[in-house]
Image (cartoon, grey):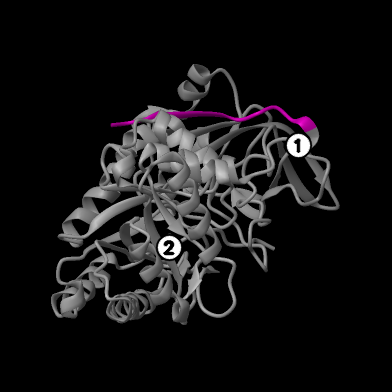
C-alpha cells in the first residue's frame, strides 16, 4: 500500500531533460563535480530567501543562527556573514565558528557539560557563555580570575512552560538544560557582584513547532518571564534570546509556519514590554527553519530487487548520513521525508518502491512504500529537507561506509 511522503520544498525545478536543478545546476553535474555520491548539496539562495523573509517580518529583532543545525564550514561562513549572531553548543563548534570568521562579540555558547577547557577557550575568544548551572558560573568566574579575563555571562533559563506541540521540548519541568527560573535571580546577582560582564537571558522552550499560536504564546510568556527575572535580580538584561522553535513541514499533512503572524504578535508584545526591558535587545535563534529546506541528499541506486512482491531500491547512501530521514532521530512512528528520482524529477509515479541504504540493518530505510517513477541502478535518489540535522547528526562511522561529500551552490 502506498504511503504518503512530505512535501518537496519550493525552489526546486527540473530542466528540459527532467534532471533536478539545485541552485540552478543539474544534480548529475553537481555529483560529477563533487566526485561521487553520496552528496549533500546546500542551496545558499534558498537560505538567503529565508533570511530576507525574517528581516521583512521581524523588524528590530536580531536573527541568530543555531549552528548545530548545520556546521558545514562553507555554509557557516556564508550564513554567519548574513545574520546578527551565531549560537553554538560545543567546544568543537566554537573552533569551527572561529575558523569561519564568525565575530566572537555576537557569538554565544550554550549546552550543559562544558569542560573547563571549553570555558577557557570561549573566554579567550570573547564569546558569551550561556551558563546552564550555578556550578558552571562558579567555574567560569574562577577561570576568569586565573586568566585575568572578565567573562561574558548570560544565564540560560529553564522556564516553567514549554512550546505546546513542539517536536523536542527544551523547557518546563526537570531538565538538564538551563537554570530553573526560581533560582535565576540569585544567580544573576552573583554574576553582577563578581564583576563579570552581564549579558542577559537565553530562554529556549522547544523546537520544531508548526503552530503559530503556540509560538506566540511561548514568546509572550518568555518576555514576561524575562521581565520578572530582571526585576527580581535588579539587573536589566542587555539581550534576551527568545529561543527559536520555528519548524518546517517534513511530513504529509504538515503546513508551513506562518511567521508573519508570529512577528506581528511579537511586535505588539515588545511594544508594551515592562520598563525593565526598555533598553533590552531581543533575538530569535533559528536553525532548521533557516537551512533545513536548502539541502538535498543525493545517493545513487546500486541495485533493484524484488522480495515478496515489494520493490527495493538499494542506494550507496543511507542512515549513516541521513539518520533523520530514516526515522531514527526522534520519530515515534516512522513517516516519509519527501524523496524523488533526481533524473526523472517531476515525472509521474509508476509504482511503489522502498528506498533503502547500504547498511546491514533493517533500520536503514530512506523511504517506505512511496510512489515513484520507474527507477533503475545508476539513477539518482534525492532526499529533501537535508539541510539541517543531516550529516553531522548521523552515525557516519557506522559499518565504516564511505563518507558523504558536501558542497554549497547558489548565492
Reply yes or no: does residue 409 show up in magenta.
Answer: yes
Tag 1's secondary structure? loop
| Position of residue 16 measured from the top left corner of the image (x, y, whole percent) | 37, 30
- The residues bearing labels 2 and 1 have C-alpha atoms spaced at a distance of 30 Å
Q: Residues within 10 Å of mark 2 (few under 14, many from 20)?
A: many
At 44% across and 39% down in the image, what residue appears? 147
Point out residue 402 in the picture as x, y percentages from the top left corner.
70, 27
Residue 162 makes an appearance in the image: no
**348 left or right of 43 in image:** right
Q: Is residue 17 left or right of residue 169?
A: left
Query: Magenta segment: does it hold 168?
Result: no
Q: Which residue is mark 1?
A: 358
- Residue 314 horizontal/vertical position (percent): 73, 38
What residue appears at the point 43 percent right and 57 percent down from the top-left corner?
A: 130
- Numbered mark located on residue 247 in the image: 2
State which quadrant residue 304 falls in: top right
Residue 105 relative to residue 168: left or right: left
- Residue ranking furthest to the right: 308
The front one of 353 and 222 is 222
Res. 368 in view? yes
- Describe the element under mark 2 as helix, strand or loop: loop
Residue nearest the viewer, comparing 375 with 401: 401
Q: Of the residues under marks 2 and 1, which one precedes in the sequence?
A: 2
Residue 62, by quadrant, is: bottom left
Q: Is 80 in front, or is 55?
A: 80
| Spot occupied by residue 77 in the image (x, y as percentages of width and height) | 36, 32
- Is 77 or 160 nearer to us in this picture? 160
Q: In the displayed structure, would residue 63 be above or below residue 212?
A: above
The residue depicted at 33 percent of the width and 57 percent of the height is: 195
**Where is 254 relative to 94, above or below?**
below
Mark whose residue sits in front, 2 or 1:
2
Range covered by the magenta-colored residues: 400-411
Amino acid at each position: 500500500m502506498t504511503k504518503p511522503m512530505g512535501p518537496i520544498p519550493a525552489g526546486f525545478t527540473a530542466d528540459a531533460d527532467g534532471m533536478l536543478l539545485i541552485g540552478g545546476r543539474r544534480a548529475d553535474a553537481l555529483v560529477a563535480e563533487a566526485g561521487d555520491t553520496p552528496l549533500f548539496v546546500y542551496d545558499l539562495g534558498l537560505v538567503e530567501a529565508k533570511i530576507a523573509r525574517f528581516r521583512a517580518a521581524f523588524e528590530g529583532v536580531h536573527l541568530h543562527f543555531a549552528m548545530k543545525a548545520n556546521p558545514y564550514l562553507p555554509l557557516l561562513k556564508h550564513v554567519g556573514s548574513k545574520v546578527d549572531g551565531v549560537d553554538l553548543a560545543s567546544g568543537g563548534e566554537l573552533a569551527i565558528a572561529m575558523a569561519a570568521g564568525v565575530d566572537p562579540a555576537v557569538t554565544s555558547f550554550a549546552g550543559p557539560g562544558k569542560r573547563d577547557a571549553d570555558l577557557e577557550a570561549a573566554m579567550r575568544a570573547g564569546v558569551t557563555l550561556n551558563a546552564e548551572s550555578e556550578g558552571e558560573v562558579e567555574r567560569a568566574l574562577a577561570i576568569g580570575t586565573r586568566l585575568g579575563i572578565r567573562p561574558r555571562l548570560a544565564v540560560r533559563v529553564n522556564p516553567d512552560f514549554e512550546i505546546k506541540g513542539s517536536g523536542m521540548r527544551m523547557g518546563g519541568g526537570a531538565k538538564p538544560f538551563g537554570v530553573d527560573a526560581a533560582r535565576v535571580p540569585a544567580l544573576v546577582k552573583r554574576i553582577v557582584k563578581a564583576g563579570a560582564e552581564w549579558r542577559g537571558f537565553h530562554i529556549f522552550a522547544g523546537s520544531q513547532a508548526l503552530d503559530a499560536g503556540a509560538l506566540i504564546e511561548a514568546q509572550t510568556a518568555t518576555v514576561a518571564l524575562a521581565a520578572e527575572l530582571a526585576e527580581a535580580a535588579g539587573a536589566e538584561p542587555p539581550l534576551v534570546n527568545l529561543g527559536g522553535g520555528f519548524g518546517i513541514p517534513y511530513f504529509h499533512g504538515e503546513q508551513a509556519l506562518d511567521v508573519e503572524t508570529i512577528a506581528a504578535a511579537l511586535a505588539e508584545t515588545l511594544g508594551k514590554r515592562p520598563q525593565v526591558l526598555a533598553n533590552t535587545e531581543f533575538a530569535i535563534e533559528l536553525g532548521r527553519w533557516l537551512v533545513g529546506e536548502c539541502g538535498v541528499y543525493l545517493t545513487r541506486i546500486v541495485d533493484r530487487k524484488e522480495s515478496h512482491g515489494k520493490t527495493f531500491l538499494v542506494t550507496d547512501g543511507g542512515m549513516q548520513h541521513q539518520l533523520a530521514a530514516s526515522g531514527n532521530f526522534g520519530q515515534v512512528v516512522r513517516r516519509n521525508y519527501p524523496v524523488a528520482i533526481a533524473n526523472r524529477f517531476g515525472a509521474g509515479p509508476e509504482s511503489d518502491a522502498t528506498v533503502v541504504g547500504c547498511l546491514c540493518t533493517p533500520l536503514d530505510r530512506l523511504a517506505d512504500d512511496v510512489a515513484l517513477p520507474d527507477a533503475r541502478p545508476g539513477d539518482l535518489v534525492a532526499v529533501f529537507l537535508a539541510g539541517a540535522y543531516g550529516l553531522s547528526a548521523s552515525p557516519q562511522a557506522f559499518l565504516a561506509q564511505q563518507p558523504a561529500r558536501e558542497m554549497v551552490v547558489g548565492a
